[in-house]
Amino acid sequence: MVRFMVQSLKVVTILAMAIGVAVGGRQFFDYYVDRQADPATGRPVAFSVGEEDDGAVIAVRLQESGLIRSEFYFSSQLRVTSGQLRPGEYTLRRGMSVNQIIDRITDDGDAAEDDAQNAADASGPRGDQVTFQEGLRLEEFAAIVEDSGLIEGGGEAFLEAARQDWSGEFDFLAGAPSVEGFLFPDTYTLTTEMAAEDVVRQMLQQFDAVFTADLRRQAEDRGLTVLEVVTLASIVERETADPSERGTIAGTYLNRVDSVDTNGTFGADPTVQYILGTEADWWPELEPDQQFAPETDTPYNTYVASGFPPGPICNPGQASLEAAVNPEEVPFLYFVARNDGTGLHEFAKTYDQHLINIELYQNGGG
């Protein structure tokens, strides 16, 4: 029965192509060719979910099966949907989006969905909601686009589109080295009919909507440009995930950039991680004194270069943007991670106290 339906679908598709060509439907023909560019699209893949399998295990096996490209993105989307894995045997198809796979193998999905529908979803026009998390850099956004399987050209097309000059269309990009930082992290509806440029434009439009005229006025009153606000917010975003600390960290950094005690340097690990990041690990842990190694000799090394780095290092969310515009008035110049599982930091007014905190929280007090 399934074979008959698949054959029938092929016959219908061929007839539709013939009709399109006959009436001069070149646009239809081009669309079909584009959708069929990947010969693996629609190919069935047997996949099983065991009773003891968790999201991490499933992510690894899905990637090994060629069904997803990013374990991280699959795991993130699984958490967003809050679906529970449903043990069983499945027939998945190459080209399915991450959300379609999650819907299929979790309790939110329809266990009776047949292979013919999967094939239609994989090869026909599709749309899905795709989440771009705060604190990720441009290349990580590109990986999410790639893994969605929705945009022609995938991650490479997205990167190419993002590297175009968008400042003529969006004035807030004036002086920015790239769109890094201005691609607003949110959940977007992507479809196979969208070009990579459409995705970038949608993200920039959302930034424009979130970073309101009122926030711009507040930044100007504080003596900060839009670029400086977004750059500061990006560093705050990478430093802490705790909402209670964002304003304190933003205020501490602004104190540092105005202080002779710190030579006007931010001294932020995330900016050095930004320099050293590669596809294997975009945010590597720093080795001792790596901040002063030759490979970190760039304007983004805020341990050496004073003032703001040239631009943002990731794409911050609304909370970090607001913290950068309205930082807390604090007396601190330094802070260090507590490493106690809370994700919080210990702040200090003086360098001597900062050294004590490093010994207590980084070196185990010994």
Image (cartoon, rainbow, N blue to C red):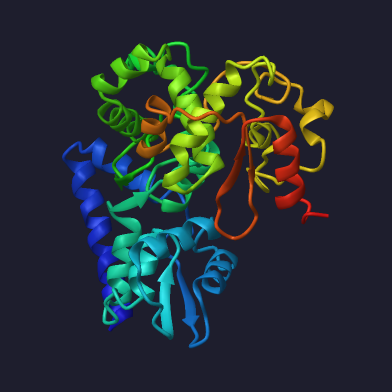
Toward the viewer: 190 or 72? 72
Q: Position of residue 93 (x, y in %)?
A: 42, 67
**Left/right of residue 272 with respect to residue 59 in the rendered view:** right
Question: Is residue 107 shown above or below 178?
Answer: below
Residue 11 showing in the rendered view: yes
**Left/right of residue 90 with respect to residue 357 in the rendered view:** left
Quarter the C terminus occupies: bottom right
Residue 157 showing in the rendered view: no
Toward the viewer: 230 or 160? 230
Taking the spot 38% from the left edge, 40% from the top edge, the residue there is 185
Quarter the N terminus occupies: bottom left
Taking the spot 70% from the left edge, 37% from the top edge, the residue there is 354
The image shows a total of numbered marks equal to: 0
Toward the viewer: 364 or 81? 364
Taking the spot 60% from the left edge, 67% from the top edge, the residue there is 64
**Left/right of residue 274 with respect to residue 180 in the rendered view:** right
Q: Position of residue 244 (x, y in %)?
A: 43, 45
Taking the spot 37% from the left edge, 27% from the top edge, the residue there is 326
Q: Position of residue 357 (x, y in %)?
A: 70, 44
Which picture quadrant has residue 188? top left
Which picture quadrant has residue 88? bottom left
Question: Is residue 156 shown above or below 115?
Answer: above
Question: Is residue 56 shown above or below 315?
Answer: below
Q: Position of residue 117 (x, y in %)?
A: 27, 69
Question: Is residue 237 shown above or below 241?
Answer: above
Q: Residue furthest left?
A: 23
